[in-house]
Image (spheres, helix red, strand yellow):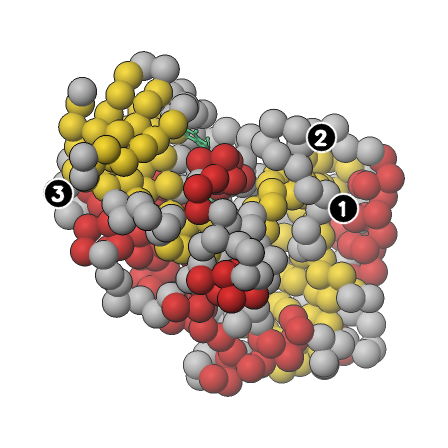
Amino acid sequence: MATYDSIVIGLGAMGSAAAWRLARRSRRVLGLDAHHPGHAQGSSHGHTRIIRKVYFEDPAYVPLLERAYELWAELSRLAGEPLLRQTGLLMLGPPDAPVTSGALRSAREHRLPHEVLAAHEVRRRWPALAPGPDVVAVWEPQGGLLSPERCVLAQLSAAARAGAELRHGEPVRSWREEGGRVVVETPRGSYEAGCLVVTAGPWAPALLRDAGLPLTPTRQVVCWFAPVSGEHAALLTPDRCPPWVCELDGTNVYGVPDTDGRGVKAGVHEPGEACTPETVRREIAPEEVEAIRRLLRRILPGAAGALRQAGTCLYTMTPDGHFVIGQPPCHPRVVYAAGLSGHGFKFAPVIGEILADLAVERRTRHAIGFLAPERFARAHPGVQA
Ligand SMILES: Cc1cc2nc3c(=O)[nH]c(=O)nc-3n(C[C@H](O)[C@H](O)[C@H](O)COP(=O)(O)OP(=O)(O)OC[C@H]3O[C@@H](n4cnc5c(N)ncnc54)[C@H](O)[C@@H]3O)c2cc1C
């Protein structure tokens, strides 16, 4: 049986990062993934991801984001290409909406550069945007965009260059602890290691069944729309129109400018219908496209033209929308990051670092108490965490 110091199951955003950070400690690392880099079955495809430090979800994420920005810069140097495109970012909504009030709270608590703008100032600075008069905006100049496919590839190649062995197209059938080691089975063989990192995205409920985590994969629809005219197209590039998140009638909607001629990307940042990666409906109904176009028209009317492309992607939700990083009970050699709840990509390298810390040293300097699985056991005494 081939023997390693650590094995990573799942080489998407989190697993490719964990393999990179583990391999940098010169440990014999094996990474296994059922699919190939850039695949569209999980959660890390679709050309763009928003990154920001102003964090309306909880200011406790900000220190993790500070480290994530450092690591994206380090990875960009290793990859020889800028992975983070700093465009700035707008969070819009009524003044008491969680998106705007939460953004302000985290910006003030952590003294992050930001501006508060009235709707007319937004329209003046970015003429494509047309927020209603009751909307306020928080502008974050450090916000920007990442390409998930390029970032995962960069993490994989950094891991491989640091000595990790990466095997794609090799699904893990099972894992178990045996005699103080972890044994992982795939159709090609058995592998043994001192520790195991599970980063299986929407497949985590199957691989972490023993952990009893309340994880729900959900189906998310994303659309790319053509501009309504050539005149509007000129206003929809990242230098004229930043990415944004906007609360409209209690629904969080997001939009990404046209970065590469594909059109403006838009979607709803709310959990869609519950599914599994095996049962998810991949076809998209015209009514689903129309619902997204209607929302987009309210904030970026010149972008809501013909549909260019639509696709599905999976969130893995926890009940409170916060990540869960920990160990399954009775498995001291196993660590996981799961339930990234539709906002995890920007954190990938720092989560990889945390997983490597926990796998190797059983502790981390990062403040992740608020992401511990024990919170579910407290909230739902029947849940084993
Ligand atoms: C539409 C959409 C928009 C989003 N927008 C943003 C955003 O703007 N900003 C942001 O920060 N985040 C965003 N997110 C969230 C972010 O993309 C995810 O949190 C992140 O990609 C999750 O990464 P992961 O590594 O957990 O999962 P994945 O990248 O899906 O990786 C899991 C991997 O595990 C592998 N695997 C599973 N089971 C096995 C097995 N048995 N054996 C071997 N391999 C296995 C899979 O093949 C897969 O490659 C968005 C998500 C979606 C769907």
- Image x and y of residue 236, in percent: 68, 54
**x, y percentage for residue 252?**
71, 61
Quadrant assignment, res 197:
top left
Asked if residue 295 can be seen in this view, the reply is: yes
- Would you name the residue on which mark 3 appears? 26
Residue 82, given in percent of the width and then of the height, sits at 37, 50
| Mark 1 lies on residue | 227
In space, the residues marked 1 and 3 are separated at their CA atoms by: 49 Å
**Quadrant housing residue 84:** bottom left
Specify which label sits upstream in the sequence, 1 or 2.
1
Q: Nearer the viewer, residue 356 or 140?
A: 356
**Mark 3 CB lies closer than 8 A to ligand 1:** no
* Above or below 67: residue 181: above
Three-letter amino acid code at disc 2? Arg
Q: Which residue is mark 2?
A: 281
Amino acid tagged 1: Pro
**Residue at image x 35%, y 70%?**
367
Q: Residue at x 66, y 29 (%)?
A: 279
Marks 1 and 2: which is nearer the front?
2
Q: Residue furthest left?
A: 26
Q: Secondary structure at mark 1?
A: loop
Reply above or below: 73 against 293.
Answer: below
Q: Kindly report the distance in space between the C-alpha atoms of the residues bearing marks 1 and 2.
A: 28 Å
